[in-house]
């Protein structure tokens, strides 16, 4: 079995999707790219998460040819491949239809930067890309056109895609996207939340991305 360690990592990330309430039935998927071989591991099409094993995952090359796998690859394979081919810094990708985030996608609205958690993780509003047809490169093209520096994007009338340098980072972005989407939706039931000033967004993003969890972050200025 090729790419055994990456298979395990991608399998664990796929299994986290239903656990975190981000998917229903067979929808959604996680993929991982191996930089050494430039092969991608992705969830197979139409297999229930509860039945999924690492051996069920499909390995394809960057042209979409199946290298190993008994099942057909996800219907989103072309989207994942397009992103990997054009973003060599990305090695993990997640797609969900999580309820609150997808509600924003349904009405073609970004998730505004009204929380420090959004500034920390996303560096600004979570953008909403235009509608694109499923099954080809069109979604991948729109992701790259509209995602900017964010690790997450909503796709109009579709759902959520997240990317990361690792599979774990892409998974974290997917979980955080749904979490902040729910909070923002709840806030909108009360009133109109204030967006953070751009300088505060930038400062929070820099702190969280570059100093959070390091020795430097524990230094307190008095």
Image (cartoon, grey):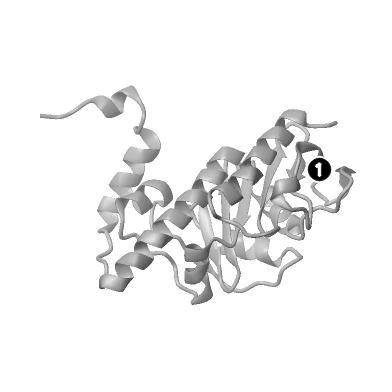
Give the image location of residue 17, x and y in percent. Answer: 59, 49
In depth, the one of 134 and 10 nearer the eye is 10
Q: Identify the residue at horizontal 35%, vertical 63% (top origin).
A: 184
Disc 1 on helix, strand or loop? Answer: helix
In the rendered view, tell whether residue 129 sits above or below residue 39.
below
Q: Would you call the spot at circle 1 few (<14 residues within 10 Å), some (14-19), or many (20 or more)?
A: many
Q: Identify the residue at horizontal 53%, vertical 60% (top origin).
A: 153
Left or right relative to 102: residue 66: right
Residue under numbered circle 1: 56
Q: In the image as oriented, which residue stretches furthest toward the bottom?
A: 107
Choose top left, top right, bottom left or bottom right for residue 137: bottom right
Q: Can residue 125 be seen in this view?
A: no
Q: In the image as oriented, which residue stretches furthest toward the front?
A: 50
Give the image location of residue 87, x and y in percent. Answer: 63, 48
Give the image location of residue 104, x and y in percent. Answer: 47, 70
Q: Identify the residue at horizontal 66%, vertical 60% (top origin).
A: 140
In depth, the one of 24 and 59 nearer the eye is 24
Left or right relative to 111: residue 4: right
Quadrant location of the N terminus?
top right
Q: In the image as oriented, which residue stretches furthest toward the top?
A: 215
Q: Identify the residue at horizontal 15%, vertical 29% (top origin).
A: 221
Choose top left, top right, bottom left or bottom right for residue 59: top right
Choose top left, top right, bottom left or bottom right for residue 14: top right
Q: Can residue 46 be seen in this view?
A: yes
Quadrant location of the C terminus?
top left
In the rendered view, tell whether residue 34 sits above or below residue 182.
above
Left or right relative to 186: residue 15: right
Give the image location of residue 18, x and y in percent. Answer: 60, 51
In the rendered view, tell whether residue 199 sits above or below residue 112.
above
In depth, the one of 194 and 97 nearer the eye is 97
């Amino acid at each position: 079995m090729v790419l055994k360690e990456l298979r395990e990592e991608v399998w664990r990330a796929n299994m986290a999707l239903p656990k975190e309430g981000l998917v229903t039935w067979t929808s959604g998927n996680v993929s991982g790219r191996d930089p050494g071989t430039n092969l991608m591991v992705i969830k197979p099409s139409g297999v229930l998460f509860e039945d999924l094993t690492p051996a069920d995952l499909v390995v394809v090359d960057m042209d979409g040819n199946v290298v190993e796998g008994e099942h057909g690859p996800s219907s989103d394979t072309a989207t994942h491949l397009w992103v990997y081919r054009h973003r060599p810094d990305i090695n993990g990708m997640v797609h969900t239809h999580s309820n609150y985030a997808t509600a924003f996608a349904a009405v073609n609205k970004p998730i505004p930067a009204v929380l420090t958690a959004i500034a920390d993780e996303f560096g600004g509003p979570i953008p909403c890309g235009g509608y694109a047809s499923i099954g080809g490169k069109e979604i991948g093209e729109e992701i790259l056109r509209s995602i900017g520096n964010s690790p997450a994007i909503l796709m109009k009338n579709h759902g959520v895609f997240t990317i990361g340098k690792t599979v774990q980072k892409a998974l974290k972005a997917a979980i955080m996207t749904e979490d902040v989407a729910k909070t923002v939706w709840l806030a909108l039931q009360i009133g109109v939340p204030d967006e953070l000033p751009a300088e505060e967004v930038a400062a929070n993003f820099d702190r969280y991305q570059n100093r959070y969890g390091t020795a430097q972050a524990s230094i307190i200025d008095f």
